[in-house]
Image (cartoon, rainbow, N blue to C red):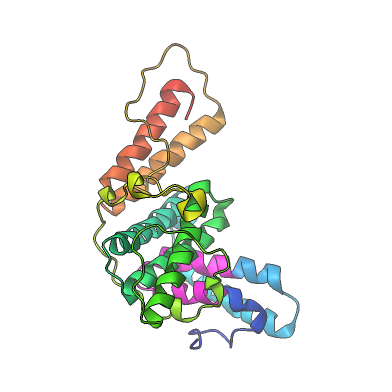
Amino acid sequence: MAALAGLPPLPTPFKSIQHHLRTAQEHDKRDPVVAYYCRLYAMQTGMKIDSKTPECRKFLSKLMDQLEALKKQLGDNEAITQEIVGSAHLENYALKMFLYADNEDRAGRFHKNMIKSFYTASLLIDVITVFGELTEENVKHRKYARWKATYIHNCLKNGETPQAGPVGIEEDNDVEENEDAGATSLPTPPPQPSSSAYDPGSMPPGSYGGAQIPPGAHAPANTPAEVPHSTGDIRLTPEDFARAQKYCKYAGSALQYEDVSTAVQNLQKALKLLTTGRE
């Protein structure tokens, strides 16, 4: 992998974060918020791996300088000053990229950009952990995207035709060690694909390790079709209000990408929580 701009040579112990840093560099102009959180994830992960040896300390020091400069550049951007907005921004971006790759895969259009999109989506889901534990849905998306990137890359490399859509995951595939899967330049963000591409009926039982990608994978699972009216005095806790606020923030972030479906579904979840006290 080529040298990372503005940073010393990557210490060997930090190999696991090299693609996250590459993704940060690719997004410096395209989406500085994504770039910032990719570097933050790399910084936090690097500190856990090795913050004592001189080589690693020097690298982390330079990375910290980049983080501080980027944070100053972003100023009062809500996605940086408010974690809930940042989390929504990153999650929507990652899942939009996942949807593009999945739509191309299901249509049997196999190319480097879709491989890159699958792999980058998996890296960005890693980055979401700076905000806390991943949802079960995000864990499934990350596993599926990372496996798909390696599977399709290996098929094309060997002159084979990949099987389109969900197929059984081979657990021994290690995408982290596959340099080529994430080596192409990042594709231009595509138009939002239709969520109709997700047909749970087309997914054979047991595929994808028993997990299924839900319709409109960008949307929270179990979104109500209709929101029930309040049935009396509902006592909401501070945590309920915080969760409702989170869904509203998610909706706002989705609208930045003109993703009406995700915005509506998050607003429905907020409304259900506020009117029933349940999710």
Q: Main secondary structure of the magenta part?
A: helix
Decide if residue 77 is in sight here: no
Considering depth in this image, is 221 or 170 the residue closer to the camera?
170
Range of the magenta residues?
17-42
* Residue 263 on image: x %, y %: 32, 43
Q: Is residue 97 above or below residue 196?
A: below
* Residue 154 on image: x %, y %: 43, 77
* Residue 265 on image: x %, y %: 34, 38
* Residue at left offset 36%, top offset 81%: 159
Whether 33 is among the magenta residues is yes
Decide if residue 172 is in sight here: yes
* Residue 175 on image: x %, y %: 52, 72
Q: Is residue 152 above or below residue 224?
A: below
Q: Using residue 156 as the reference point, say whether residue 67 is left or right of it.
A: right
* Residue at left offset 45%, top offset 34%: 244
The total of numbered circles placed on residues is 0
Considering depth in this image, is 154 or 100 the residue closer to the camera?
154
Q: Is residue 117 above or below residue 276?
A: below
Quadrant of res 18:
bottom right
Quadrant of res 225:
top left
Residue lying furthest right:
52
Whether 258 is among the magenta residues is no
